[in-house]
Image (cartoon, coloured by chain):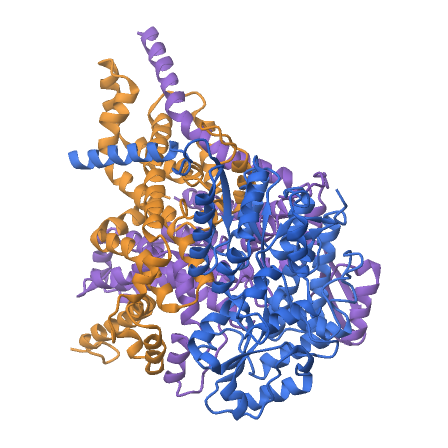
Amino acid sequence: MTDRLGFKPHFYRIASHAVMILFALYFIFPLVFMIVSSFKSEQRIFSDLKTIVFAFLPTEFTFENYAYVFHRVPFWRFFFNSVFVTASTVILGLFINSMLAFSLARLYWPVKKIVLSFIIAVAIVPLETIAVPMLVLVNHLPWFDGSVSWLDTYRVQIFPFAAEAFSTFLFYQLFIGIPKEIDESCYVDGVKPFRIYWNVTLPLSKPVFATVTILQSLAIWNSYLWPLMVTRTESVRPLPIGITALYVLNMRWGHILAFASLITFPMLILFVLFQRWFVQSIASAGLKG
Amino acid sequence: MRRKTHSLQANQRTYAWLMGLPGIVMLITFVVLPLLLGAFWSLTNKRLISPVPTQFVGFENYRNLLSIKTLQVEQDNPEKIREILRNDSEYRGYRELFRMKGPHGTRLVLASDVVFLKSLRNTIIFVLFIVPGQGGAALILALLVNRKIRGRNFYRATYFAPVVTSMAVIAIVWSFLYNPSQGVINVLLKKMTFGKVSDIGWLVDVRYALPAIIIVSAWQATGFQMVIFLAGLQNIPVHLYEQAGIDGAGEFQRFRYITFPQLRNTTIFVVISTTILAFRVFTQIDVMTHGGPENSTSSVVYYAVEQGFRQQRIGYGSAITMIFFVFVLGVALLQNFLLKSEKAID
Amino acid sequence: MKTVKLVVVMLTALAICGVFAGGSGETPADGAKELHLWFHGGTADETEAMRDQIKRFNDSQDGYVVVMTEIPGGAVAGSGYNDSVNAAAVAGDLPDILDLDGPNLYNYAWAGYLEGLDGYMSEQLRSELLPSLIDQGTYRGKIYAIGQYDSGLSLVGRVSLLKKAGVRIPRSIDDAWDLDEFVAALKALQALPEVEYALDCKMNYGAGEWMTYAFSPVLQSFGGDLIDRDTYQSAENILNGPKSVKAMNFLQWIFENGYSVVSPPDDNEFVNGKAALGWMGHWVWKGYHDKFGDDVVAIPMPDFGSGAVTGMGSWAWAVSSQSKHPEGAWKFLEYILQPEEILAITDINGAVPGRSTALEKSTLFGNGGDLNIFVQQLQKGVAVPRPKTPGYPAITTAFYTAMDNIIKGSDIQSELDAAVDAIADDIRQNNGYPVQ
């Protein structure tokens, strides 16, 4: 059996696999190179480059680069900072944004329309447009412990990103679709709105919580501009800033690639484990946005 | 009964305020307030560190950023032109943006902040390449991995993997890949072309630096758009294809008359979100090229950070971000318009 | 589901704790006052040596405890140290003691963020410090910063290669290479089969302070400069004058003809034997010497026509005017300026000890020492300080941006014109940096 052009279906299958493999190579080769080379000595990295094929093969297996990274930079500190800032921001954000969305979607609120358009307007403002004035602003914000500035703290990395208009919007879209009858029967029984939010609405909206969690985690975990501006000490700096500091300080590629691999592993592992979630959440954000 | 509704509403109103307030307060504090401050400071000469008091300067910053003049010269003599530019008070502080050669000599287009206009140009070029390039590639990938074929989960994971990596890390790794003499990419190109292509100065050559940045960016983000297209594809009702199958439509026709129209909304979303994300390009430039060589990779955001943060010129930097904001706003309004017009069609 | 809830609750608790927890945990014992110190984060060994010094100081007395914060990124542009200092200065959050890279201090002194040190300094200390250190630390007649060491900049070469190429090895600044000899040396070394290229210019440091520090001396040796040093108000006809153009022409020639490379893959081109000569700062000497032993030699900077010129100035210690305990901060500076403490750090980073009494004890820098050239350069006025003006940050940015473009092939005159305009713009924006 052949088609109009005289090719067998077989041919198309192989051809499309070939195309897909080529794409796969393109997307994966930097990561393979990074991980494979991170286990090689400096000389080996460069000598393997000459033959190119070996550059992508594990021709050597040493932990020296990793040992150096752990010795030279407080990797676990950076790691903790990243995890902590990401987790705090996301969790805080889930509450704040879903509560705001709930009050917009489910409660009687005369100014609802205004608030909703406010949120849509705010969603447009990218961080980059406000980063500089925000830097000056957080520089002069007081805190409970008597300090006069938020610079170089965890809170400066957390609070500005907890409330997030796009997440609120995603929550709102889901909440507005839940039948009102459920709430009304509760109100008749005298249940307070917060209880309804907590016991009825939240359990019904797990998928959108997963979506927001994943999108926000990716954004915060990988953020660069803001922590670059507001952190200076290792005690609060996250991983991406940690690696750029090492990059400008010391130019041994083995070390850099080991550090780069260390930063990439956690997200990569999470991604492999929860691949379907990642893909679904981005897909649903796309459909609703 | 009416009374009960009323008290219920009052009760809900209290809760609405209570539950909504944290979010609203934080959005005002960390988005609206900085935006207003920035808008105000863009009219001043505020600096981060200076014992000299801040002054209100009106639209001076904007004028500085956007001023353009032209200069007609009969001969293309660099020394003569330089003499005019450096000595004629009318052109003081202006530099050449580009030149046009005509029958009656050369017309020079001069700008008071060449770097800003170049950054604007670079950003627009970046967007013009990224949006169709990355979007098109994402659509092709989505179509490929949406079929029932062996290993499609593996392919999806592979294409998506760069999305979960951090751009700061990726930019560092790619700087190594791009090294002119010792980088994987040049070595690979050299082997594949039997030495005909070699020693491309990816990040150091004015001609290649911006393409190099575009390639990294597309590498990192295509998977993201692919997934959105994938979702769009899976949302297309199967019966449409079944009907087409009965009518005997070919693969291409099915794409042309079913898939593509059905993907309209998804495509608008991808185009708009990619455009806005592309306008914001910063990290890879900051890590890989610092905007160089000859500002060929400087983007609007990079220049804003450079001026407002590193050079401590808060006022000037704020003016740049305000202009940037106008662009983003324009794109967002365009999206609104497109989606509205679609609803009207329905 | 239960576990998910539990995890959420735990993470929330953690978040709340962390957000509300205060700064660092170290609290000084029995009434000692805490002094905060910022260190720019040098090499691993330098940081280690700094830690030891602080420990010795803390153990030596009971009144003060110095707590160090290392801010990584160092001198490299855009990597954070200066940005951090700027932001902290605005917030009124500066540490008691901080180190500043040479010429940046004038801006901070002008803005009033630094404490004058004259009142604290003993006559003896003042007389023993290298004149170059006093010179660099002084702004408008007052001392604001003192370095433990000054920097050294020179060429470095491999004796075996130089001999093989038939190149004369100058041993003191009086017989430095001239332009023709330097060019001939580059050509001869480039021709050697074991050499990939002649000169490693450390361009892996990127567009940043290194370029101004290491290559503005080339401008000066050709007779040009960064700015008019009488007024510090204009760079017109100086940075873009014919002599500076000639200097940049020469630099561009080096890179365009492959005698040096614009983007070396890493910091080890000389150590790996790929480059025959290195344009080096003192901090790399130890690594070079460890690798090649006596085969490596420091060569004085060439004389390109207006005399040999080298850079000077390094990281120097300053006391913030926001400090509540300036006398304690000074006590610490006095401690680390003792000869043996100076040597403890210069033995590691290879910098020129900043005090005559320390210099005498140094084998590396004493007469006949491997790096005695650095001392000669500083003492014989060959070293030129970077412009002493609050406008320096703008000057250096303008220069290294232009240089970065020029070595990659841009038009020299228009790049230098642009640099001059950028400097003028900055001076205008700051109302000419009026005296406060």
| Residue situated in front as seen by the camera: C12 or B41 | C12
For the C terminus of chain A, the quadrant is top left
Picture coordinates of residue C273 (x, y %)? 45, 81
Residue C115 in view, yes or no = yes
- Image mark count: 0
| Residue situated in front as seen by the camera: A102 or A37 | A37
Vertical side of B24 occupied by B263: above or below: below
Q: Which residue is drawn at 38% across and 48% down?
A: A219
Q: Quadrant of residue C234?
A: bottom right
Residue B235 in view, yes or no = no
Q: Which residue is drawn at 54% across and 92% down?
A: C165
Identify the colour of chain C in the image: blue
Please indicate whether residue B128 sits to the left or right of residue A180 in the image. Answer: right
The single residue placed furthest to the right in the displayed view is B88
Picture coordinates of residue B304 (x, y %)? 58, 51
Vertical side of C401 occupied by C271: above or below: below
Q: Quadrant of residue A110?
A: top left
Please indicate whether residue B228 sits to the left or right of residue C178 in the image. Answer: left
Vertical side of C105 occupied by A97: above or below: above
For the N terminus of chain A, the quadrant is bottom left
Q: In which quarter of the image is residue C382?
A: bottom right
Please indicate whether residue B178 sits to the left or right of residue A74 in the image. Answer: right
| Residue situated in front as seen by the camera: A87 or C46 | C46
Q: Which residue is drawn at 61% across and 74% down?
A: C373
Q: Which residue is drawn at 77% across and 60% down?
A: C229
The letter of the orange chain is: A
Identify the colour of chain B in the image: purple
